[in-house]
Amino acid sequence: MSIEIANESGVEVDTDAILAVARHALDEMGVNPLAELSILLVDIDYMAELNHRWMGSDGPTDVLAFPMDEGSVDHGPGESGMGEPALLGDIVLSPEVAAKQAAVAGHTAADELHLLTVHGALHLLGYDHAEPDEEREMFALQNKLLQSWRAGRKAG
């Protein structure tokens, strides 16, 4: 799986851990191993600009997901794909917003970035949380992926 990450936020973050949690989530979801993903960490001003431009919302948000090619995502062995690599899309993260949310939630900024990375990856795979049943499904899956990733890190 090809995952590119660029930290343009001006905030020091553990990009290796972000890459690892993204890879884990996509592997666990059965995404084609040839798939490509881009992760971009941006400052609060640029995130506010993106949020306004693409979501019509004011102010910065924590994560945005921009799917590229939804039709070619290989969701696992149950679906027949042509074996072609899928361009999943982009996940854009704001470490500054994540740090504020982490303080409120009572965990580290790194933990919040890991959660947001998995959240963004699930959005790229077509999950949403607009309806209560969708939210339950997506957040349960998000928690399961984070727990299995953390368990794997402790074991390693």
Image: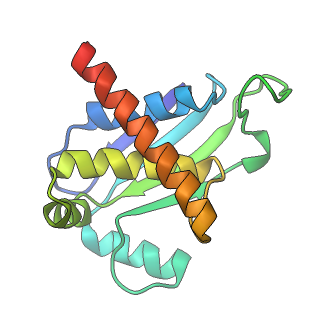
Q: Is residue 65 above or below residue 1?
A: below
Q: 93 or 129: nearer the eye?
A: 129
Q: Position of residue 2 (x, y in %)?
A: 52, 28
Is residue 12 visible in the rendered image? The answer is yes
Horizontally, residue 138 falls left or right of residue 13, namely right
Q: Is residue 156 above or below residue 95?
A: above
Residue 28 location, quadrant:
top right
Number of marks drawn? 0
- State the quadrant of the N terminus: top right
Residue shown at 71%/34% (left/top)?
75
Horizontally, residue 63 falls left or right of residue 10, namely right
- As drawn, the residue found furthest toward the top would be 156
Q: Position of residue 20 (x, y in %)?
A: 36, 29
Q: 121 or 28: nearer the eye?
A: 28
Q: How is the image coloured?
A: rainbow
Residue shown at 27%/22% (left/top)?
153
Q: Position of residue 72 (x, y in %)?
A: 77, 40
Horizontally, residue 119 falls left or right of residue 14, namely right
Q: Position of residue 12 (x, y in %)?
A: 14, 47
Horizontally, residue 109 falls left or right of residue 56, namely left
Is residue 20 visible in the rendered image? The answer is no
Q: Is residue 57 above or below residue 101?
A: below
- State the quadrant of the C terminus: top left
